[in-house]
Amino acid sequence: MDTSTTRNFCIIAHVDHGKTTLSDRLLQATKTIADRDLEEQHLDSMDLERERGITIKMHPVTMRYRADDGQDYTLNLIDTPGHVDFSYEVSRSLNACEGALLIVDAGQGVEAQTVANLHLAVKQNLTIIPVINKIDLPQADVAQVKRQLEDILAIPADEAILASAKQGIGIHEILEAVIKRVPPPKPLPQPNLAALVFDSVFDSYRGVVVYVRVFAGEMKLGSQIKLMMSGHNYDVKEVGVFTPKPVPRPQLGAGDVGYIVANMKSIADVKIGDTVTDARRPIAKPLPGYAEVHPMVFSGIYPINTADYEALKASMAKLRLNDSSFIYQSESSAALGFGFRCGFLGLLHMEIVQERLQREYSMDIIATYPSVVYRVTLTDGTRTEVDNPANWPDPSQLQKTEEPFIRAFIICPNEMIGDVMALVAEKRGELKHTETLDIRRVMMTCELPLNEILVDFVDKLKTITRGYGSMDYEYAGYRDSDLVKLDMLINTELMDAFSSIVHRDKAESRGRMLAEKLKEVIPRQLFAVPIQAAIGGKIVARETIGSMGKNVTAKCYGGDITRKRKLLEKQKEGKKRMKQIGKVNIPQEAFISVLKSG
């Protein structure tokens, strides 16, 4: 099959540099979508993507374009996310392409994620086409951005295309550059079918819809295919391309990007990165897939109503099909009942998954405080991984504790270096080196514990730098750390839902903060309730909820003082006895408000 008129490319950039707006203009320029049907962020199909203005899932689309040389070309575009948490989506889309449009905002210049995404594309040997977008903005500084392309990214500035996706400037030049610079797909020498699965979605009527890039051979209606990881055979019911809605086609050939519908009913049948081949004439070895993704952040997700447990389990299974980087397993808590321990790539990923469960599957859920995976070495020499405070070993058995670190690349204005360094130091991080990018900005390379950046690090960075700071990070391995398990005791009873693993230096302040929060939300009892934060057997923070007062002396009018004293003593004895046998029932709302506040 002739692939000389096919071009496969994707769009990569930092968050909010105009990827999705540019893909809208490309759809318009190639007349893939009629003007009356086009809407803003057309490829962002989720309400969540439109509301937040971010891309969460990659979106493939096939366009037809007549070039200046009079030839008709097929352009397969994949719009990718820009946020660091979704870099796995980016790496998967790069595997299905031969070229990439690298978008840089003319007002903001090269950002941390621009550098990270470029490295991913270079690793895949893709042809890079730099595009300087938003040149119509008043603060656009094209000359400065060109210098940054050469100095930071080592891309010749004269290769850059000047564009404004909003105004439609430079769109024709971008399409011509894709045709001239991006090489056509090279079919594999073998004639047998070989296609890479780069995504999949679940359709309630048709089962699993698999997104593929075909590298060799062809598949059509009635073909018998085999998934090499699972070894299962299927009959193809439909093949097609995205324009951007799924449109059936007679066949998919080498170089094509599209979808297949077979009789796949089970969610677990399809693995991202699997190879689809011909069931009768399979290829000898599978195509190179993707590196197994490892979750960085863990959190417990529980249904607010325990009767919804099975529904939540089914919803998570469907969500897992759409998002292969999300993992979960069953767990139970004395306070919250049955739920799941879930793994995410980062905090935004966690937030998006929770919101999708609430919106798309109408689940009422509660999430526990996020944590990471720690490594512990016991006194008998065995090493184990712990992602849940409930599994933390007894302190007397611990020989060594380690926690994951990240290498963060922070780009910020020159005058804010001191503030950013103070933030890094506060989070137990250290500055490794700084690099001057241009007259206004520097790139700081720091190493920090992953646990410290989970909740509010990016928010604080944006506040300190007035929105001009950006951050990208990569995993930097495990380091020795003095970690302890912080327990919360309410009326001397251990509450496992509030337990957490923290660094010894931070344990006291975190214990005090949790004790104060619990004091606000737990209702008062007829006896005083102590709230204690403990490390092992040592109490490091305490708050006391005062008892409800009952005026037992109200009936005594005048008379001897000893009558009143006797009644007060009797009340005191009663409260003492009540404290020994009384139980504090913590309402569900108290758990939710404390866990949500973190």
Image: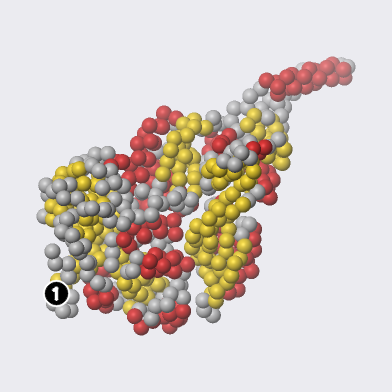
Q: Which part of the image, by quadrant, shows the N terminus?
A: bottom left
Of 86 and 51, the residue lying toward us: 86
Q: Is residue 334 visible?
A: yes
Is residue 538 toward the left or the right of residue 589 in the image? right
Residue 316: image quadrant is top left
For image coordinates 84% across by 20% down, the residue present is 565
Residue 17 appears in the figure: no
Position of residue 215 measured from the top left corner of the image (x, y, whole percent): 22, 60
Residue lying at 55% horizontally and 55% vertically, measured from the top left: 405
Viewed as shown, does residue 244 lie left or right of 474? left
Q: What residue is shown with label 1?
A: 71
Residue 29 vs residue 442: left or right? left
At a point 31% along the width and 41% down the height, the residue shown is 268
Numbered label tally:
1
Three-letter amino acid code at disc 1? Gln
Task: Point out residue 466 in the picture as x, y percentages from the top left corner.
Answer: 55, 66
Quadrant (top left, top right, bottom left, bottom right) of the C terminus? top right
The residue positioned 56% from the left and 46% from the top of the image is: 375
The type of colouring in the image is: secondary structure
* Image coords of residue 148 (percent x, y): 45, 78
Placement of 395 over or under 169, stated as above or below: above
Can you give x and y, in whole percent of width and height, for residue 16 in the image?
Answer: 41, 65
